Image (cartoon, rainbow, N blue to C red):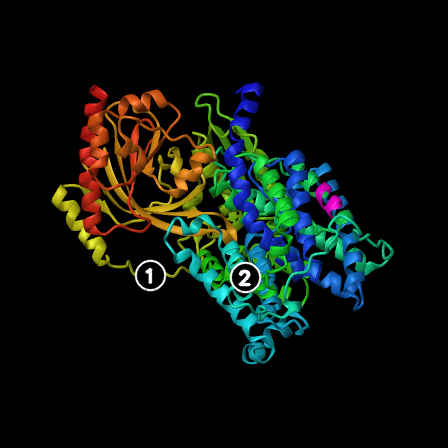
Amino acid sequence: MTKKAGVSDSIKALPQNMFSGFVVSLIALPLGLGLAIASEAPPLAGIIAAVVGGIVVSFFGGSHVTIAGPGNGLVIVLLASITTLGEGNLFEGYLFTLAAIILSGVLLFLFGVLRLGNLSEFFPATALQGMLAAIGIGILAKQFHVMLGIRSVKGSTLDLLQAIPDSIFNFVAFHPFSGILGFLSLVFLFLYSRIRNPYFHLIPAPMWVVVGSIGIGYYYNLVLNQQTPIDPNLLIKIPDELFSNLPRPNFSKWNDSSFWGVVFSITIIANIESLLSIKAVDKLDPKKRRSNVNKDLRALGLASVVSGFLGGLNVVTVIARSSVNVNNGGNNRSSNFFHAAFLILFVVFLGDQIQRIPLTVLAAILVYTGYRLASPENLFRVHKIGPEQSIIFIVTLFVTLYSSLIIGIFIGILFTFFVHLVLSKNFFLFSLNIFKPNVLMYLEEQSGNYYVSVKNFCSFLNFFRLKIKLDQVPESQHAIVDFSLCEFVDHTVMEGLHEYQRSFVRKGGIFEIIGLDIHAAETQHPFAVRKTLPIPMLLGLKGSLTNRQKELDTFSKQLDWTYTAEIDNAPEGLDSFLFFDSKTINYRNNIMQNSNGSFSLFDLSFSEGAFITKEDLKATFLLFKSEKKLPVFVLDKEDLRTTLYHWAGFNDINFDQYPDFSRRFHLSGPESNAIRKLFTPDLIYFFESHPVFHIESNGKEILIKGKDRLSSIQEIKLMLAFSKDLSMHLTLAQKN
């Protein structure tokens, strides 16, 4: 693609990126306010960070669909900084912290200049999850009391946790209305994902509770003609003069060791949070682009410097808002800019409404965020990989809670190394290859394949050396990674290799991992630690089929089809459909297939979002091959959501002579003329007279998605009958 064509595509994408930026701003507003208040900073400090981050990173960043702003991970560090550096004076502590944020931004910028973007590779994945869980518990412990209207509870994270029962029993005596409002907001946040109405989900959950709380205030003022029963101290306060009397950072503690401890803590946590978020969001990018992490670090560092001088928090790449951006059609950096622009408009024109937001509601949003970070499901997920991983997770979590984030992650790294040493049972060889696995790569002349051989040990401490080699292989080629000479492969490496495998598949390449058949693993999980030394393995009995699986097996035999209940961890061909552009395919099972393989029906597990916004979904799909080449298209039910997408730049192909079809269906695709030629009157009537499914064509195959859940046997029979009729009508349409 030429530069001129790229600019033209960016201009065409502006409407949909503006729409996505607007949706992101609806989440960024309450989160920015809440994160600032949770850090004991002025409420606008979080909005300033989001605005500066959105503008600076959109111009100078190296990522494509990420959103920049204040992050969850630094709340605990900033809170400790403001409360300790000021020695009891929160405003003074805030000014000292602004200076620390500025110097941290300078260090982050230097990290980018020195190309230290691979720093996160030195942190084991499980230890990082344990540290983030500790951050989540810290946020939850602090904000739970505020959610109930009690701001007087102070102390360490453990002290705050121990005080939760007292706050639950005593909040009625302080601010019962505010506390109940905060609690109900938390309940709504937990129930939000279970509400299936697509119109309801057009507004993000945090904005629902914010708008609802403002509406309650207006109800008391305008309908009941009363003052809202919320203490003024539990409402947001914004200065009358927004752009005057900006706080001046105080650098007078530049020679204090505790001050520099804060600087380094902010820098390390900001670096880790940003790099992890960038890597996670790259998996969601519909265009399968890789971010320039060093360029992004420079932009984030510059943004943090500017934000600090303006009185804002530090700027990092944020995973939750980035996931929302991708899910709403954001495909370039302009969505980051638009999210910042909308935040400015909100603050300037809706300042009175913002000051009606109760702190208890914002605290409920942060309690929910903290729970997602520290959810027990994260520990269960880690335990499935291996028992040793759950031990690493728990040790890192408790050390972080009892000490600090820096000490926690440091102990997590040391403990992970110790666990690996125990598992390998070869101290000399393991220590000899801590940072230097023997990695050999060459291009095979006859086959044209890239062959990579890994020798001795491969762990989180030396994975970056393997990555250097793998990054040199074009993702459209065939790569073979051989571990037959490697005695130990850890969880971080296995997870990283899985991501390479996904990237190669998406770009049309092949990424094969061989040599692990001689390795033992503690569990069946694909990310489990692998080693050649024998280890005890718990072999469970093979589970019997469920009633649904038995019915599927019976139905397959009636059709003379094959059926397997086994899990396929690497289903091929599905990444070519647009439905999976911003989704992660986990596995498929319960696979039914006809004798020649032209029709297959299966259950599929896939995920939307990433990290704390990640949601695992399951649905039933049907795939069949077309006899002739088809145009690429997507057909779905027309509703308010698709109408908004149309306004935001998603083309909808309509037929003037068939208004009922155009009203009921949203049809899109890159080749409008070919699609119009395919959709004959007979085919249009077929769709009008049958149930509505999500249907996609990748040119060779048709994918049909059932409901947003697993389909029943009757629904599967309906889907199968529909697909066979559709196949026949498509064949007739192609002949015409």
Residue at disc 2, secondary structure:
helix
Residue 139 is drawn in which quadrant?
A: bottom right
Residue 65, position as x, y percentages in the image: 55, 38
Q: Nearer the viewer, mark 2 or mark 1?
A: 2
Which residue is more in the foreground, 688 or 1?
688
For the point 52% across and 54% down, which residue is it?
207
Amino acid type assigned to the residue bearing label 1 in the image: Gly
Left or right of 552: which side holds 471?
right
Q: Residues within 10 Å of mark 2 (few under 14, many from 20)?
A: some
Q: Is residue 455 visible?
A: no
For the point 26% across and 30% down, which residue is it?
625
For the point 54% across and 61% down, which residue is it?
218
Residue of label 2: 218
The tag earlier along the polypeptide, 2 or 1, is 2
Viewport quadrant of the C terminus:
top left
Amino acid type assigned to the residue bearing label 2 in the image: Tyr
Which residue is more in the foreground, 586 or 678?
678
Mark number, residue 540? 1
Left or right of 157: which side holds 22?
left
Q: Is residue 2 visible?
A: yes
Which residue is more in the foreground, 575 or 396?
575
Residue 154, position as x, y percentages in the image: 68, 73
Look at the image and give the residue range highlighted in magenta.
302-307
